Image (cartoon, helix red, strand yellow):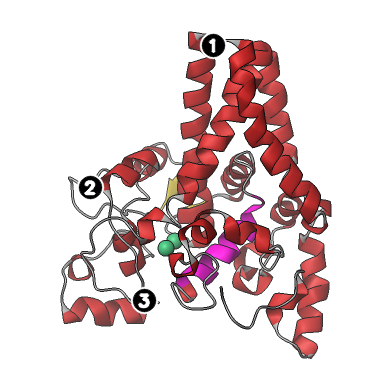
Amino acid sequence: MAEAVVSSGAGAQNGTDGAADREASRLSTAEGWWTRQDSIAQIVYWTIHAACGLVFFVGVSTADLVLLAALFYARMFAITGGYHRYFAHKTYKTSRAFQFVLAALGCAAIQKGPLWWAGNHRNHHKHADQPEDLHSPSHGLWHAHQGWIFEGRWDGTPLEQIEDFARYPELVWLNRNHHVPPLVLAGLCLAIGGFSGLVWGFVVSTVLLWHATYTINSLSHTWGSRRYDTTDTSRNNFWLALLTLGEGWHNNHHHFCASARQGFFWWEIDITYYLLRGLAAVGLIWDIREPPAHVVQRTAVAKAALREAA
Ligand SMILES: [Zn+2]
Ligand SMILES: [Zn+2]
């Protein structure tokens, strides 16, 4: 485990001087009730896992499976195309209204709020596979996959990493109340598909979505090939790219994280990127960033450009 562990809580990540106090008071505005209820959040997390057992009692219909797949992939895109490629890396531009839609859909994936998610992810890139990395597999595969979530150390939103989006009050509200979109979604599943719709469409879909997302932190740093000699352990993996709509090209991503496109070559399937192109075609997003040719090539020039872009 990492050394220099600080105590749990929002302000604890931000130093020990007056700046930390200022940050702590600002952080409190971005934290909701859930952030301070660590044990309850864990109970909810494991209860949703256990509730998957209800599939043996409610049966299954084609409509249930369609709902499961639709909500798995729709929310996967909200995480990959929204939380990751927009809020964490700003790889394209959009309107304030559509930005809010992306944030709300991301909340429905039950991976906390957009400021928390994107701020912590920026920290991952900053410290990838170093002691300060939130979820490096060098601390163990369980830790990288989901153990880090339960440490308490990362519960607070690192606002100093995400000031660009923290200036939007509607995003701060969602960050504080990230439980609202999942509750609305659960209600919709119940209304559309009855109890079996709730179990398959919400419960099972959410657990699959969690663990598919987590593979990028665990398996994408341990399983696959390395095209670029990055300073971390990131890998490219075709199967994980299929599962996560393109995030499995993780070595590409660590090599040049400013790109909306993570599959650098035509054979590197990156469905999130295709969907982003579709959103651009109808005018919802624009200024999609691509990897320059010299960055894609494994050259010393590419390394220098990468350092400049960081
Ligand atoms: Zn990574
Ligand atoms: Zn990233």
Is 68 placed left or right of 39 in the picture? left
Question: As rendered, which of 13 and 272 lies closer to the eye?
Answer: 13
Q: Within 8 Å of ligand 2, the CB of disc 2?
A: no
Counting residues from the N terminus, which is met first, the one under dot 1 or under dot 2? 1
Residue, x 78% and y 59% (percent of image)? 31
Compared with 252, 33 (above or below) is: above
Q: Could you tell me if the residues under marks 2 and 3 are in contact, i.e. CB atoms within 8 Å?
A: no
Is 131 placed left or right of 176 in the picture? left
* Element carrying mark 2: loop
Q: Which residues are magenta?
A: 112-125
The quarter of the image holding the C terminus is: bottom left
Q: Which residue is mark 3?
A: 309
* Ligand 1 image-quadrant field: bottom left
Identify the amino acid type marked 3.
Answer: Ala
Mark 1–mark 2 distance (CA, rounded to whole Å): 34 Å
* Element carrying mark 1: loop
The outermost residue toward the bottom is: 17
| Eye-nearest disc, 1 or 2 | 1
Compared with 23, 152 (above or below) is: above
